Image (cartoon, grey):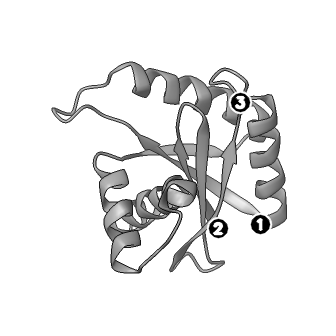
Amino acid sequence: MRILGLDFGSKTVGVAITDPLGLTAQGLEVIRRDRPNKLRKTIARIEEIIGEYEVGKIVMGMPLNMDGTEGERAELTKEFAEKLKKRCELDIEFQDERLTTVEAYEIMEQTGTKNKEDIVDEVAAVVILEDYMAANK
């Protein structure tokens, strides 16, 4: 079963996926939208990916505050997850995403990646998915 990893942001969603055996995570793409509340096309694209890759579960990054509490971004993430779950009918689990963007930038720096801003959310989705996989072996 493949697991889809999502890094939900105000204007982008970073997307990553596991291999069929669930051993590794790879970045797929960054879904972009013009406005934060325009989610229809974003959800439709995620549905396409679910069908194409035969996804069995979704893991979304949960943007907790540094003290572990939930703020406005966490609430928006939960609202998006509810809308997505109604459409795709898959289990959605959350993974703490604190500092994943920092880690994504470090990874891209170490690998000499150019155009970091274009793919940082995709790399962050990979980090979220890898963290989830490590915590749920």
In the picture provided, is 44 more to the left or to the right than 77?
Answer: right
Viewer can see residue 135: no
Who's the residue at 34% across and 54% down the image?
100
Q: Is residue 31 left or right of residue 13?
A: right
* Mark 1–mark 3 CB contact (< 8 Å): no
Q: In the drawing, what numbered circle is on residue 87?
A: none
Residue placed most toward the observer, 125 or 60: 125
Q: Give the foreground label among 1 and 3.
A: 3
* The quadrant where residue 5 appears: bottom right
Which kind of residue does numbered mark 1 sit on?
Tyr
Determine the secondary structure under disc 3. Answer: loop
Residue 116 or 41: which is nearer the viewer? 116
User: Residue drawn 57% across and 23% down?
Assistant: 79
Question: Quick one: label 2 or label 1, which is nearer the N terminus?
Answer: 2
Q: Residues within 10 Å of mark 3 (few under 14, many from 20)?
A: few
Q: Which residue is mark 2?
A: 2
Q: Which residue is mark 3?
A: 34
Residue 115: in sight, yes or no? yes
| Foreground tag (3 vs 2) | 3
Q: Which residue is mark 1?
A: 53
User: Does the residue at mark 2 contact the one at mark 1 (Cβ under 8 Å)?
Assistant: yes
Q: 49 or 108: nearer the eye?
A: 108
Q: Position of residue 130 (x, y in %)?
A: 42, 67
Q: CA distance from mark 3 to mark 2?
A: 29 Å
Q: Secondary structure at mark 1?
A: helix
Residue 51, quarter of picture = bottom right
What residue is drawn where x is 53% and y is 63%? 115
